[in-house]
Image (tube, rainbow, N blue to C red):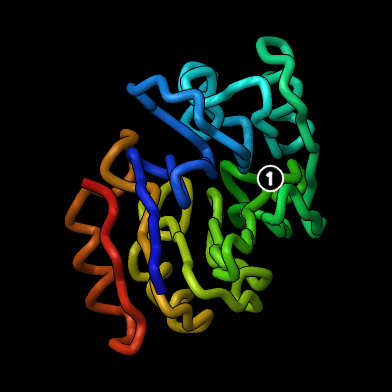
Amino acid sequence: MNLDIKINCHSSICINEFYYIDPFKIEEKTNNAKIIFITHPHFDHLDMSSIKKLVNSDTIIVCTESSKEIIQKELANKIIVVSPNLKGNIENVEYSTFPAYNYGHHHFKELGYVGYNLTIDNIKYTICGDTDATEELKRIKTDVLLVPIGGTYTMDAKEAAVLTNIISPKVAIPTHYNCIEGTAKKDAEKIFIDNVIKKIEVSIKIK
């Protein structure tokens, strides 16, 4: 697979130059986004300063209702509201959502936060969002899995590796660490890599 995936930091992901997920701490003003996907309204996933550096008049934003309430106060872009277990297609990008949540803390299931499955140029990407290793995630099949390993607000590196082995993607990319206070540092990468089965390629994108 010919992958073009960048992580600015944390869970701030860019796929194929024009598709952004949870942009955060973006410094360069490009205004080149075709679609921006937001998983939930927490500051490290919905960063209006970063979004404004990426949007143009044609940019479509996909987000939950709670995120829309924040975004529409400052931007007039088209917004598509999602909740868990929805499917859609935007300009040849297929998407589906699944619930992203913790068991009993921080990100509660009833809040309706989401992760995304995106099919772009015939490659399926799964962006987990802020979540534990849920039963819903264990049922997903994907080519590229972007999975949080930071602990505290998400699953930790060992839990993420076990989940990755169950899903068995072609490529696994760890996210959500080495940025926010209370989450794991760079040493979490080794724990993740050491526990992922060897047939799965682990690609490190966070500096």
Say left or right for 107 vs 168. right
Residue 155, percent across and down? 45, 59
Q: Who's the residue at 48% across and 75% down the image?
A: 163
Examine the image and state in which quarter residue 55 appears: top right
Comparing 45 with 130, the one in front is 45
- Where, by quadrant of the figure, is residue 29 drawn? top left
The residue under the point 77% across, 27% down is: 78
Residue 99 point in image, percent of width and height: 70, 56
Query: What residue is shown at x 58% (from left), y 46% (from top)?
Result: 105
In this rendering, the answer to whether 190 lies above or below 83 is: below
- Residue depicted at x 56% and y 63%: 126
Quarter residue 164 falls in: bottom left
The one nearer the camera, 169 or 123, is 123
What is the secondary structure assignment of the residue under circle 1?
loop
Whether 27 is drawn above or below 107: the answer is above
- Give coordinates of residue 203: x percent, y percent: 29, 66
Check the picture and name the quadrant holding the N terminus: bottom left
Q: Is residue 25 left or right of residue 70?
A: left
Q: Is residue 86 left or right of residue 115?
A: right
Q: Position of residue 168 (x, y in %)?
A: 48, 83
User: Which amino acid, mark 1?
Assistant: Tyr
In front of the other: 99 or 58 = 58
Q: Is residue 86 above or below residue 153?
A: below
Residue at the disc numbered 1: 113
